[in-house]
Image (cartoon, grey):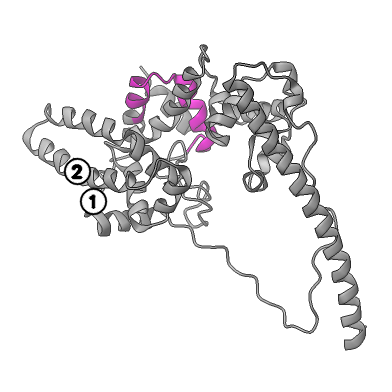
């Protein structure tokens, strides 16, 4: 039997007070914890810059607090609000439309996915990436069967809902595409301009026309300081989505997808990491960013089962990453990543990619 209106409101106020008290306690604990994470990260960076050795005490060894209180009660005096649909995430059709509208650009699409795989392997091998790195990361990021135009959330059904703009074999976000074009676009341009000189006249003219368009895209990508937040703002514009369409192009897509991994390898080498990164280690840098990923993969092996993965994330990034939450210490996350790779490399797409290597 439902409560009378006055009794229902009294219970609501009591439940709300309990909820607010629990949320306030959790938020205070979370603020303290994530401030501690940030402080330890700054300290580690300072020690590394000064050449000092790290100890395990330079990491937070406690797991982040988890809210375990009651859910927020519903106000019985107000009508139930329908569930709000999640925000719309642009998809491949939007990237193509933006490219056409903003830059009069239409990517040169492959005749089939195997053609794109061969172009990607050629670019990756020329950059020094190993077969193991390329195939296992593709298997992890693109399910072992993903196509060059795969978008996050649509791995198993084109009728699903995109959850981010992450696109392609290495799942580049639109922000990645803008940032890579800003930082490496001139290198891509020079390489393809040289390639154009070796082509028959019609193909040469087509590539040179494309390069003239991409020159404008590079200028747009470089119109802000070289900073992730600045590039993220550009990536949300129509011109930014147009740049993301380069991932679908046979000339530029393999270069963009390759460069994302190559940047991490170059970062590690610059830090003095001599041996090749394993695919799982490279994926950690792909997952958490080069600095945090490098921090993770270079720690002593006997620390890995003690150091929480939260040390390598911002609070919002950790909240959005259920894999890092489930595998909540470094050893577990690396093991889980390797396990996924071991499974997905057996799929036809991964085998096709592997076969494209000489």
Pick out the residue farthest to the top: 274
Separation of residues labelled 2 and 1 (CA atoms) = 7 Å
Q: Which residue is drawn at 42% across and 26% down?
A: 262
Examine the image and state in which quarter residue 49 appears: top right
Quadrant in the picture for the N terminus:
bottom right
Q: Residue at x 51, y 47 (%)?
A: 152
**Does residue 134 show up magenta in the picture?**
yes
- Tell me the residue that label 1 is attached to: 105
Position in image of residue 29 (x %, y %) = 80, 48
Q: Which residue is drawn at 46% across and 50% down?
A: 165
Left or right position of 210 against 119: left
Q: Tell me which numbered mark, 2 or 1, is placed earlier along the sequence.
A: 1
Above or below for 202 versus 17: above
- Callout 2: SS: helix
- Callout 1: SS: loop
Pick out the residue farthest to the left: 201
- What segment carries the magenta color? 120-145
- Tell me the residue that label 2 is attached to: 210
Position in image of residue 283 (x %, y %) = 55, 29
**Does residue 103 show up magenta in the picture?**
no
Examine the image and state in which quarter residue 284 appears: top right
């Amino acid at each position: 039997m439902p409560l009378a209106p006055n009794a229902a409101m009294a219970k609501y106020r009591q439940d709300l007070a309990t909820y607010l008290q629990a949320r306030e306690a959790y938020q205070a604990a979370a603020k303290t914890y994530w401030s501690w994470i940030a402080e330890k990260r700054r300290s580690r960076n300072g020690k590394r810059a000064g050449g000092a050795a790290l100890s395990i005490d330079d990491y937070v060894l406690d797991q982040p607090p988890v809210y375990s209180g009651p859910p927020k009660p519903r106000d019985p005096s107000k009508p139930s609000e329908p569930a709000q649909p999640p925000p719309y995430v642009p998809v491949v059709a939007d990237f193509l439309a933006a490219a056409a509208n903003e830059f009069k650009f239409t990517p040169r699409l492959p005749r089939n996915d195997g053609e794109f795989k061969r172009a990607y392997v050629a670019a990756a091998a020329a950059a020094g990436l190993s077969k193991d790195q390329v195939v296992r990361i593709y298997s992890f990021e693109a399910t072992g069967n993903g196509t060059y135009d795969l978008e996050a959330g649509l791995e198993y059904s084109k009728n699903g809902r995109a959850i981010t703009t992450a696109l392609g074999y290495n799942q580049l976000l639109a922000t990645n595409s803008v940032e890579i074009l800003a930082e490496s676009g001139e290198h891509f341009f020079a390489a393809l301009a040289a390639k154009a000189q070796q082509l028959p006249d019609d193909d040469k003219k087509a590539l040179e026309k494309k390069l003239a368009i991409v020159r404008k895209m590079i200028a747009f990508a470089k119109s802000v300081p070289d900073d992730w937040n600045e590039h993220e703002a550009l990536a949300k514009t129509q011109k930014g989505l147009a740049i993301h369409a380069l991932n679908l192009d046979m000339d530029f897509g393999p270069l963009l997808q390759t460069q994302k991994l190559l940047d991490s390898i170059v970062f590690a080498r610059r830090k003095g990491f001599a041996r090749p990164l394993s695919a799982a280690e490279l994926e950690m840098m792909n997952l958490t960013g080069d600095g945090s990923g490098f921090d993770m993969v270079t720690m002593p092996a006997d620390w890995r089962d003690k150091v929480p993965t939260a040390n390598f994330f911002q609070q919002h990034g950790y909240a959005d990453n259920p894999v890092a939450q489930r595998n909540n210490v470094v050893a577990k996350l690396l093991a889980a990543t390797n396990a996924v790779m071991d499974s997905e490399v057996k799929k036809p797409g991964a085998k096709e990619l592997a076969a494209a290597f000489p």
